Every structure is written in structure tokens, then in C-alpha cells.
Image: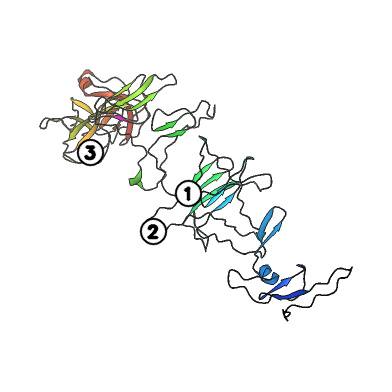
Amino acid sequence: MARNPLIRKKEKSYATPMKNQSAGILDDFAVRKVVATKEGSITRTPVDDIDIANKAYVDSNDFWKRVGDVLSPKTAGDDLNMGIGFVGVGCDPTYGGDIVSNTGFGQLRLGSSSADSTPKVFGLVGRHYDADEPDIALLFGQSLSAQTDLFWGGGGAFNPATSQNFITSFDNDAGGGSVRYTISDAGNHDFKAGDIKTTGSVIIGTSTAPVSKFHVQTDAWNAGSNIHLASIINRDGNSVDSAGLLVKGGANSATGRTFEVQDYSGNTDFIMYGDGHSEFSGDIETVGVYSQSKIKLTPLGGYAIKLTNKTGSNSVAGELVNASSATENAVEQTAINDEIPIGAFLDSGVSDGSEAWIVVSGIAQVLLDDTIAASVGDWMKVSSNDAGRAESSGSEAPEINHFREIGHCLENGNAGELVKIAMHFN
């Protein structure tokens, strides 16, 4: 049989190893007798799945480097885009970014290497498919514990944070936004704008379960400092916006305890019922005015009643009056030497036909006669010179003036001016 010309003639055997060489072509394929051959190179860019890639191609398409246990992009600043895939650290990922640790902390750190004093923004952004889907920007949860801790700032390898701002209207590209809420390292909470809303209860100063919707309680509060536990202050300079506190009872109940004040032991000091009825457990003292619809105590210490002014003109403070002889529940000006005075106007300017306060006892101011001054301790009566005026005397008046008496002078006063008296009638 003739020899195949494609098969190289067999060399003689020698004791030394054979150099790298091809055995020629067998059945259309070159067979390497020694794998470590350096013969030839691969220059074609691999296209098909069965193509062989050379080292240069592999190196140019390897975007990762590994140093020890750290895997990072070869080119600093390159992005990692997982598309719709998941990333898991210490676990098989169930969600987009799972971090599991059995040593106490599973940490995802976002950091900046520059120190140019500009704000650095690291964001976890929840994106939705369209505008109808809700966003959950960041969710913290515990699967097997009743408590989830959220840590801000640091210490150790981190700079300690003195405060944390919560910002709305933030722009991913431009930054900015509006600070709405700040919590300081001392635990102070500062709401910058907007309302605070809850369907639950608000508790301040205690961890005790609340007994009301708004509960403020303390066991030790500024001893000796006389500082209020709670204050409601309206600093609006507009006189029509003077509202301070509204207390509104439920169900229009006449017997409902709309407002109540208790002492330390829980005893009721003051209570106001739904129908406006009030009860006090102690004395009532006031430096202002106590009044109801028809009676009031004046700041000077007088007792006043409300009657209609029928003098024919506007009221004049301190002017003496008697009961009207023509109109019910009304007063008219006293005549000269009038023997039936009942009091004096408290205020000026009340028009004829309108109700006015009339001081009828206690401490009152009366308008003196235009020609007679008064001294402290003088006996006071209806004037014998001017209608509606008072007249003083240094001695007890004769019996004829008994029914003209209106009281005793408590201070010195000039003629034609107001003077303070202790008012009474015979």
C-alpha cells in the first residue's frame, strides 16, 4: 500500500526529548503531540459560541479586579447596573438588595472620597412604573423581632452627627429641597413647617399609657422656678385674632364636665358644665371684673347693676341717677336736692335708651359739684346746686338731708371732678 504523503516520515528515536512539533494533518485536523506548544497565535475576534478568545480580548472585557476579599471595578467611577436583577450580601437575595449578617451588623456604606466641604447626597430611591403606583422610598423592618432600631450618625469610624434633617421636594439631579423636620443629637425634635396629625394620642413627659387624647404629665418640674408646665400663647398683634384656648364639650350635654381643674390629690377645685353652670370649691377673688348679664363687680370694688339710660342724653361717668318714674327698669338724672338717689353711672357714652351699668353700692366714683371740693372722710349727699352731681360736707348734715345721703368720701377731690366714695343710701 502506498504511503500517505500527508503523513510525515517517522524520525529516528533519540535519547533526548523531542522538540515541539506538529504531527501533520490527520483526518483534516492537526494533532499536537505536545500541548505546551508556542506555535502560532489567535488573532480573530470571537463571534460564535465555539470561537476561542485570546488573552488580549479577555483582558479588555474584564471590568473587575479583586484585591484580597474585595471585588471592585477596574476603572474608578464605573457604574454597576443590575437591571432587574438582585444583589445579595451574605445571602441569596430575595429582594433587590439583601444584606444579611450573623455578626451583629450588615452594613451598606455610601461614602465620598472628596473633602471639598460641599454637601454629599447618597440616596436610596424607590421608583414606580407609573404615577398611579405608590412609592416606598426606604423600608426598615424586623422579621423575627418586635423592635427595629434605626441608627443615625455615628462615632467610631464615623464623624458623630449633631442633627439629622428630613427634606422634601428634593431633586435627584439638582439637590436642594426643603427641610421639614430636624432631630438633634440631644433628642430635640423641630418641625419646620406643616401640621402634625395623628388619630392616636399624644403623650408628653411620661411613658404611662394615656388616659386622654392629649396627655402632659411630669413628676418633677422646675421646682421653685414658677414655670408653667403647659402654655398657650397667641402673639398675633391683630386685635381681631386674640383667640387663645377653646374648650368644647361633647354632645351638648348640660351635665357634661366641659372644663375641670383639680388639685394634686385629684379633688375638683373648679368645674364648668355643658350648660355654663360653674362650681368652685374655694373662695372667688378677682382683680378684674366679675359680671353676669345684669350684675357685676367693678375693678374699684363696687357692685353694679344694668338698667336702661333714660336721662335724655349720653351717660356721664359718676353722674347720680334715680329710678325712672316713666320707664320700667330704667334710670334718670337726679334733680337738685333729690331725695331718692339709687346710684351713679359707671361709664360715659352710653346712649339714651341703651342699657348702662349703675354702681349702687360698695366703692364708687361720683362727680362733684362744680363749686365744692371734697376731703377724705366728708359726708356726701345729692348736690344742692347741680343736677346729677354730689356735694360734700365736713359735718353731719341736718335731718332734712337724711334721704339725700349717698355715702362717705374716701379721698380728697377737686370741685367738678370725680371722687371715690363708699356708697350707701338711707
Residue closest to the eye, 30 or 369: 30
Disc 1 from disc 3: Cα separation: 53 Å
For discs 1 and 3, the disc positioned in front in the rendered view? 1
Quarter of the image where the C terminus is located: top left
Sequence-first disc among 3 and 2 = 2
User: Of the residues shown, which amino acid type is indicated by label 1?
Assistant: Lys
> Is 139 placed left or right of 5 in the picture?
left
Image quadrant where one finds the N terminus: bottom right
Q: Main secondary structure of the magenta part?
A: loop
**Tag 3 residue:** 315
Name the element at disc 3: loop
Q: Position of residue 77 (x, y in %)?
A: 63, 64
x, y percentage for residue 28? 66, 76
Q: Nearer the viewer, mark 2 or mark 1?
A: 2
In this view, 399 is above or below 23:
above
**Callout 3 touching callout 2 (CB < 8 Å):** no
388 horizontally vs 221: left or right: left
Q: Residue 292 location in percent, x, y?
A: 26, 29
Which residue is disc 1 drawn over? Answer: 192
Q: Which residue is mark 2?
A: 131
Nearer the observer, disc 3 or disc 2?
Answer: 2
Using the image, tell me which numbered label, if any, was put on residue 22.
none
**Name of the residue lying farthest toward the right:** 15
